[in-house]
């Protein structure tokens, strides 16, 4: 069987995977805090038809002759650049200016990390995300009493409210998690990430410490997906798929010619 046919098949499979990644990016173009994914490829093992030889006996050196056997998926990376911010004027919408991720605590006291800052108050006055996971502060959950007249967040993460007597009170101070390799985080859905051994967790500290950014209230960070870039990548993936199908078609025609030689 022609090696070109197998190479074409591997190229088609990779083009399909690339389209899957692009489709997911486009589908999440309006998802709060979403970080786009990028896929890379690498060549597979090559078949050596002749080895390299060094110079000697009055003859120069000769390079090795190798035939490639196609391509394979290299990595699918999450690109953690900042997305554009959208003004909402909702006091429970938080955006991070700089590095860091919000820490939310879910079931079984499991911590997750997110850049999606759309939070709410539950019936107990705790600040939670859309899944009911608690936003974490220096001392755990952040609670705003029901009698509070108004509340807001400071750039240093301090959440304050006005009590029934008109006095300013502090509800808590939000902490942000810092990772040396945020691309190593694992997506678990619902705009949440889980820590992994390769994420390089540095610390969960208050904004402005250990390189974390500031918090801006009344704004949300949207996705960092660039539609023009995604559409361009979609075109190249489509053309790559078409070219690889052409390789298979041409290889099939050659095999047909070989079969017809017997007739």
Image: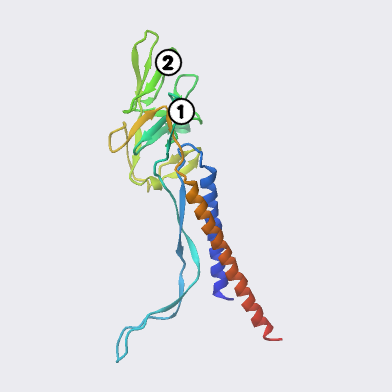
Q: Is residue 46 above or below residue 138?
A: below
Of the two numbered discs 2 and 1 on the same chain, state the one appearing first in sequence.
Answer: 1
Q: Position of residue 186 (x, y in %)?
A: 44, 45
Determine the CA span between mark 2 and mark 1: 23 Å
Q: Which residue is pictured at 36% across the width and 9% down the height?
A: 166
Q: Which residue corresponds to the image point at 60% horizontal and 70% vertical from the top-left?
A: 248
106 vs 99, left or right, is right
136 above or below 201?
above
Foreground mark, 2 or 1, reads 1
Query: Residue lying furthest top in this view?
Result: 165
Q: Residue furthest bottom?
A: 58
Quarter of the figure with residue 174: top left
| Image coordinates for residue 223, horizontal then vertical, percent | 46, 40
- In the picture as drawn, the residue positioned furthest to the right comes out as 263
Residue 10 falls left or right of residue 162: right
- What x and y, as percent, mark residue 93? 44, 28
* SS type, badge 1: loop
User: Quadrant of residue 109 in the image?
Assistant: top left
- Specify whether residue 114 is in view: no
Q: Quadrant of the N terminus?
A: bottom right
Residue 145 shows which numbered tag?
Answer: 2
Circle 1 residue: 88
């Amino acid at each position: 069987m022609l090696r070109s046919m197998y190479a074409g098949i591997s190229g088609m499979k990779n083009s399909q995977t690339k389209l899957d990644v692009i489709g997911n990016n486009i589908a999440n173009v309006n998802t709060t805090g979403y970080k786009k994914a990028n896929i890379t490829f690498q060549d597979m093992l090559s078949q050596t038809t002749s080895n390299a030889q060094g110079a000697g006996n009055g003859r120069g050196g000769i390079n090795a002759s190798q035939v490639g056997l196609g391509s394979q998926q290299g990595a699918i990376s999450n690109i953690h650049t900042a997305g554009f911010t959208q003004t909402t004027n909702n006091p429970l919408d938080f955006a991070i200016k700089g590095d860091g991720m919000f820490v939310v605590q879910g079931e079984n006291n499991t911590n997750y990390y997110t850049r999606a800052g759309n939070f709410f108050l539950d019936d107990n006055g705790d600040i939670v995300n859309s899944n009911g996971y608690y936003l974490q502060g220096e001392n755990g959950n952040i609670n705003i009493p029901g009698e509070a007249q108004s509340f807001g967040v400071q750039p240093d993460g301090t959440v304050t409210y006005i009590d029934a007597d008109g006095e300013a009170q502090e509800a808590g101070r939000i902490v942000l998690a810092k990772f040396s390799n945020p691309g190593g985080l694992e997506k678990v859905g619902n705009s949440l990430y889980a820590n992994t051994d390769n994420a390089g967790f540095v610390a969960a500290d208050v904004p402005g410490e250990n390189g974390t950014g500031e918090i801006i209230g009344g704004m949300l960070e949207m996705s960092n997906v660039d539609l023009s870039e995604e559409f361009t990548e979609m075109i190249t993936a489509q053309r790559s798929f078409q070219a690889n199908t052409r390789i298979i078609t041409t290889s099939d025609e050659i095999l047909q010619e070989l079969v017809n030689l017997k007739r």
